[in-house]
Amino acid sequence: MKKKFISAVLAGAVSVGFAMHSLTASATLKPGDAAPAFTAQASLGGKTYTYSLADELKKGPVVLYFYPAAFTKGCTIEAHEFAEAVDEYKKYGATVIGVSHDNIDTLTKFSVSECRSKFPVAADADSKVIGEYDAGMPMHASMANRVSYVIAPDGKIIYEYTSLSPEKHVENTLKAVKEWAATHKQP
């Protein structure tokens, strides 16, 4: 009986270990990969419009971040951090866009309250963009994992970071933008 209990506990621990690994493992796009072009309904400051990655890349690098769901604790923290850093990204010619599976009505509210009208958030209700960027949650592919990319104006990914924790996404992407700017004669 004792051996069966120990075996069951060990099997459970191994299962939990695999489950935790699958939450952090990623099949995301990597630096050097071409960033898939997309357009999507987005909201900035409560105003809805059609966002085009190609148009934004003409202005400079784009920080594209995926997040699981608007108005959840981690996504709210992350939105606040990106909002606080937008002016710093702009110093290096970069723009920010957040993408989630939420509908545009939800994101219109989120763009004002949590993004503080500082950067747009795009609706990917059919999870097409999430799929093209391999940014789906491991056990729920239609919902975005927390993944951040920095895309150079030539359309190539120069940085990728995946972590369910909202911490470090702004710090890491800002560092990548600064490094890119330093090698491309940006201020």
Image: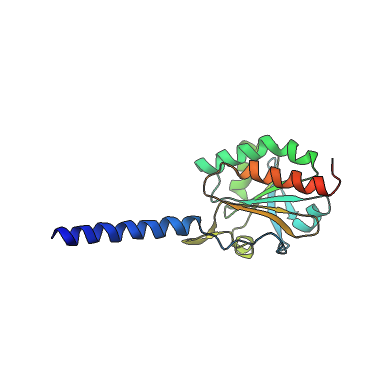
For the image shown, how many numbered marks are present on the structure?
Answer: 0
Where is the N terminus found, in terms of image quarters? bottom left
Residue positioned 65% across, 61% down in the render: 30
Nearest to the observer: residue 5 or residue 70? 5
Q: Residue furthest right?
A: 185
Q: Residue furthest left?
A: 1
Nearest to the observer: residue 3 or residue 135? 3
67 relative to 179 in the view: left or right: left
39 relative to 21 in the view: left or right: right
Please name the colour scheme applied to the rendered image: rainbow
Determine the image quadrant of residue 129.
bottom right
Where is the C terminus found, in terms of image quarters? top right
Nearest to the observer: residue 25 or residue 89? 25
User: Is residue 175 visible in the rendered structure shown here?
Assistant: yes
Residue 130: x %, y % from top left: 60, 60
User: Is residue 117 visible in the rendered structure shown here?
Assistant: no
Nearest to the observer: residue 112 or residue 96? 96
Residue 88: x %, y % from top left: 74, 37
Residue positioned 77% across, 50% down in the render: 61
